[in-house]
Image (spheres, rainbow, N blue to C red):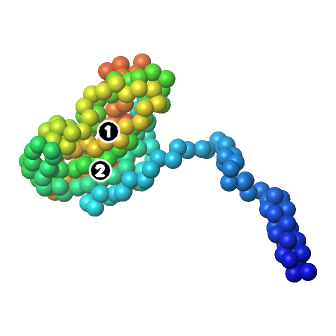
């Protein structure tokens, strides 16, 4: 009698499981309009502050600022070490994606840092070279790139924002206008 009750319990669980909205393990999850790619999480570097600012676009290129590191006295790369000549290096980690249907001529070293005194700084080309970061490239349609950009600024300056450039467009063939993104909201 006890084994009959056991079989009845197992069957009732099996029948009830089939009545739920939970998909079976072999079924793929339902498609949704907000589906995303499972991009792996990357650990934040010990000296880096995570930035939580909205993604901004310039042309058809979207920029997401990911991390900020300030007060770096020097940089070490695969072939050189270099001290900050003005006082500190600032590193901004960013992700860019070309949402267009065509490739775009992208200059990863064109972005400009703006400090709390509204002074602008160009990318430090030697720092970018030492840290083996990208230069100019053909950013293909729907291609995503994540990289660091480096600036050498005075020790008493605080980074306020960055002006990013997404490449030439029909409205801006010289890629001169750019888009400003504040580092804090």
* Label of residue 7 in the image: none
The residue under the point 34% across, 32% down is: 165
| Residues at circles 2 and 1 in contact by the CB criterion of under 8 Å | no
- Expressed as whole percent of the image width and height from the top left, the position of residue 182 reads 36, 48
The residue under the point 41% across, 26% down is: 140
Depth check: give the residue in front, 127 or 59.
127
- Expressed as whole percent of the image width and height from the top left, the position of residue 155 reads 14, 55
- SS under mark 2: strand
Which quadrant would residue 168 be assigned to in this image?
top left
Could you classify mark 2 by the number of other residues whose Cα lies within 10 Å: few (under 14), some (14-19), or many (20 or more)? some
Please say if 36 is above or below 45. Answer: above
Please say if 136 is above or below 56. Answer: above
Depth check: give the residue in front, 113 or 136.
136
Q: Residue furthest bottom?
A: 2
The residue under the point 49% across, 23% down is: 101
- SS under mark 1: strand
Q: Is residue 124 left or right of residue 82?
A: right
- Expressed as whole percent of the image width and height from the top left, the position of residue 127 reads 16, 42
Depth check: give the residue in front, 23 or 140.
23
Q: Which residue is mark 1?
A: 163
Could you classify mark 1 by the number of other residues whose Cα lies within 10 Å: few (under 14), some (14-19), or many (20 or more)? some
Q: Give me the C-alpha separation between circle 2 and circle 1.
A: 10 Å
Q: Which residue is mark 2?
A: 160
Kindly tell me whether residue 116 is visible in this rendering: no
């Amino acid at each position: 009698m006890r084994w009959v009750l056991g079989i009845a319990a197992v069957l009732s669980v099996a029948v009830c499981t089939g009545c739920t909205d939970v998909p079976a393990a072999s079924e793929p999850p339902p498609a949704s309009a907000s589906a995303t790619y499972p991009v792996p999480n990357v650990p934040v570097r010990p000296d880096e502050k995570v930035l939580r600012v909205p993604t901004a676009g310039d042309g058809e290129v979207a920029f997401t600022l990911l991390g900020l590191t300030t007060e770096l006295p020097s940089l070490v790369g695969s072939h050189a070490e270099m001290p900050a000549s003005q006082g500190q290096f600032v590193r901004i980690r960013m992700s860019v994606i070309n949402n267009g249907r065509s490739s775009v001529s992208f200059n990863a070293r064109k972005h400009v840092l703006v400090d709390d005194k509204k002074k602008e700084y160009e990318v430090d080309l030697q720092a970018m070279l030492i840290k083996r970061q990208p230069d100019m490239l053909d950013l293909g349609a729907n291609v995503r790139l994540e990289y660091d950009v480096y600036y050498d600024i005075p020790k008493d300056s605080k980074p306020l924002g960055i002006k990013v450039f997404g490449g030439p467009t029909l409205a801006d063939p010289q890629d001169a206008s750019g888009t400003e993104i504040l580092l804090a909201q």
